[in-house]
Image (cartoon, rainbow, N blue to C red):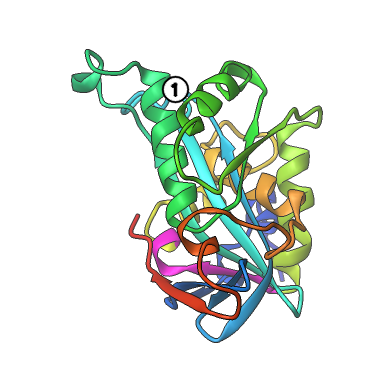
Amino acid sequence: MLLEPTPARAAKLDPGRLVTYADPLHAAFANRELTLSIGDTPMVSSVCWWDPAYGRPGRGDRSAIAVVLIDRQGKYWLHALRYLQFSPKDLEESDEATQLVRQAIAFAESLHQTRLFIETNGIGRFLPGLVRRELRGRASRLTLVERHSTRNKAERILQALDPILAASHLLVHQSVAESGFFEEMHEWAPDSSARDDGLDAVSGAILEQPVTVGSRRYAGAAGSRSTGSGFHANTEFAI
């Protein structure tokens, strides 16, 4: 009997090990603290990671941003992934970088994130100032955290995804499944030139864990409510 060799890429990132779900993200404010849950499962950590690129429609690298959460059992929930693109027809009103920054902030805020992690390699080193400018003066709980990566991209992706895929501990929202992320996984290999922008953003969010949910105190509408009161928001982010 002849044995057929398995392609290296098929052995690396298998989309078949992903568990999909459709539950929304819930945010609750009580005693001026934030708690997050997906369906009935409480989350203990959440990271929003942006791997920026210019995101020119149909050309070059894509600017990917992802939100990954962890539950009490140590399972990872990839709840949202978006590929940001600037609009050429809006360039007279705002430049490419400003458009992308505004999209990234809106994405993070819509998912009740308190920190926006940005990879400052490449064009990312020019963006933190723009992010802070856009956040200045607005009622936002979001703060910026800069990260410079010195590791090889393929190494980061494997380090982040291999262990939790092997344990089937990566759950993926249905909207992410429809974004093209599965195709990235299927086509990717350490030495390939296939698209990996979403993989890189998700890996960054996974490796940055944990950022504990509820570790900050908040001002603003939610935080201004009287002690002991609560506010509940049901968020379903459409990609």
The residue at 31%/27% (across/down) is 57
In percent of width and height, residue 4 lies at 67, 60
The residue at 46%/39% (across/down) is 104
Quadrant placement of the N terminus: bottom right
Q: Quadrant of residue 227?
A: bottom right
Answer with left or right where residue 33 lies relative to residue 235. right
Q: Is residue 175 magenta?
A: yes
Whether residue 2 can be seen here: no
Give the amino acid at mark 1.
Tyr
Q: Quadrant of residue 92?
A: top left
Q: Which residues are magenta?
A: 168-176
Mark 1, residue position: 54
The residue at 51%/78% (across/down) is 230
In percent of width and height, residue 141 lies at 55, 49
Quadrant placement of the C terminus: bottom left
| Of the pair 91 and 77, the residue shown nearer to us | 91
| Of the pair 165 and 192, the residue shown nearer to us | 165
The residue at 71%/56% (across/down) is 161
In the image, residue 2 above or below residue 197: below
Whether residue 152 can be seen here: yes
